[in-house]
């Protein structure tokens, strides 16, 4: 008989693959930046937020905080590496004002993460307490990142068009959240279940909206492009 832990590991591995696909979703944007040698009007905010999110989830998954969560660590390490590469490309072709903004944001993030790690390790002396503190912080930041899909859903309902809500990206986000929600339910982890449960709900709504407004979408409409919207980053993303 297959053990729950083995099933959990398989689900987590699938979740890793799906999360990496999501982390790679901005690649076309950065290919465009690289090709044009300019960041144009693209903003670094989604990538800065994802780097912070991944860093905190890596910390959460370490044995000194929450044992038996290696797959959370691997997923978010991959996410951190990919988003760091994107930020390096962005910084290379950004203007001075954009570079200062990115540099300041990174300094603030480094200081915040360092403060969290230092305080947790020095003041919380049990895995349970460390898991609770770091988990709450990660959950809040992760849930806040769902502002992006909420924004694009509002645009879809307003314009009755799914032109700017890629189907496969929405599907990948939904499947990633499903994997990580299942992973967290097998060996119950509230802090992973909540953000990914929210991702499942939002994913279902996005797919329903896509099906509902697909026929009314004018794919040849050259209206002003809607600002880039990033997919939700589950559990570190990962989740």
Image (cartoon, rainbow, N blue to C red):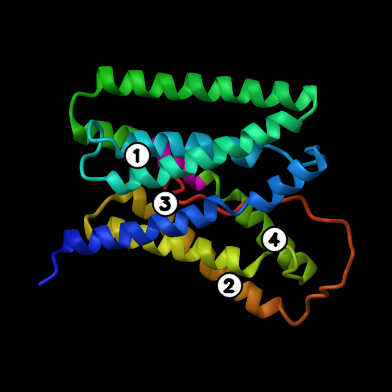
User: Residue 207: which numbered mark, if any?
Assistant: 2
Q: Which residue is mark 4?
A: 154
The part of the image, by quadrant, that contains residue 14 is: bottom left
Q: Is residue 166 left or right of residue 163?
A: left
Q: Residue at horizontal 21%, vertical 45%? A: 68
Q: Residue at horizontal 42%, vertical 58%? A: 17
In the image, residue 91 lies at what x, y percent? 69, 29
Nearer the camera: disc 3 or disc 1 = 3
Label 3 to label 1: alpha-carbon separation: 13 Å
Compare marks 2 and 1 and give the one earlier in the sequence.
1
Circle 4 residues within 10 Å: few <14, some 14–19, many ≥20 = few
Farthest bottom residue in view: 215
Label 3 to label 2: alpha-carbon separation: 19 Å
The part of the image, by quadrant, that contains residue 33 is: top right
Q: Is residue 8 above or below residue 91?
A: below
SS label for mark 4: helix
The region drawn magenta spans: 135-143
SS label for mark 3: loop
Q: Which residue is mark 1?
A: 135
SS label for mark 2: helix
Circle 1 residues within 10 Å: few <14, some 14–19, many ≥20 = many
Nearer the camera: disc 3 or disc 2 = 3
- Image marks 4 and 2: residues in contact by CB distance under 8 Å: no
Label 2 to label 1: alpha-carbon separation: 29 Å
Q: Which residue is mark 3?
A: 239
Nearer the camera: disc 4 or disc 2 = 2
Label 4 to label 3: alpha-carbon separation: 24 Å
């Amino acid at each position: 008989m297959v053990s729950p832990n083995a099933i959990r590991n398989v689900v987590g591995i699938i979740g890793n693959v799906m999360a990496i696909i999501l982390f790679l979703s901005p690649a076309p944007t950065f290919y465009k930046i690289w090709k044009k040698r300019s960041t144009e009007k693209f903003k670094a905010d989604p990538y800065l937020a994802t780097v912070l999110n991944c860093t905190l989830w890596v910390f959460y998954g370490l044995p000194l905080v929450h044992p038996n969560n290696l797959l959370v660590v691997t997923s978010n390490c991959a996410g951190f590496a990919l988003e760091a590469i994107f930020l390096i490309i962005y910084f290379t072709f950004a203007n001075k004002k954009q570079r200062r903004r990115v540099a300041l944001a990174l300094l603030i993030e480094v200081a915040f993460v360092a403060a969290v790690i230092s305080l947790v390790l020095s003041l919380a002396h049990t895995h349970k307490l460390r898991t609770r503190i770091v988990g709450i912080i990660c959950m809040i930041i992760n849930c806040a990142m769902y502002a992006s899909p909420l924004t694009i859903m509002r645009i879809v309902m307003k314009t009755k068009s799914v032109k700017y809500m890629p189907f496969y990206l929405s599907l990948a986000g939904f499947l990633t959240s499903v994997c990580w929600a299942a992973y967290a339910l097998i060996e119950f982890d509230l802090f992973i279940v909540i953000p990914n449960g929210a991702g499942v709900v939002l994913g279902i709504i996005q797919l329903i909206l896509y099906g509902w407004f697909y026929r009314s979408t004018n794919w040849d409409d050259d209206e002003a492009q809607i600002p880039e919207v990033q997919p939700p980053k589950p559990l570190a993303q990962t989740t």
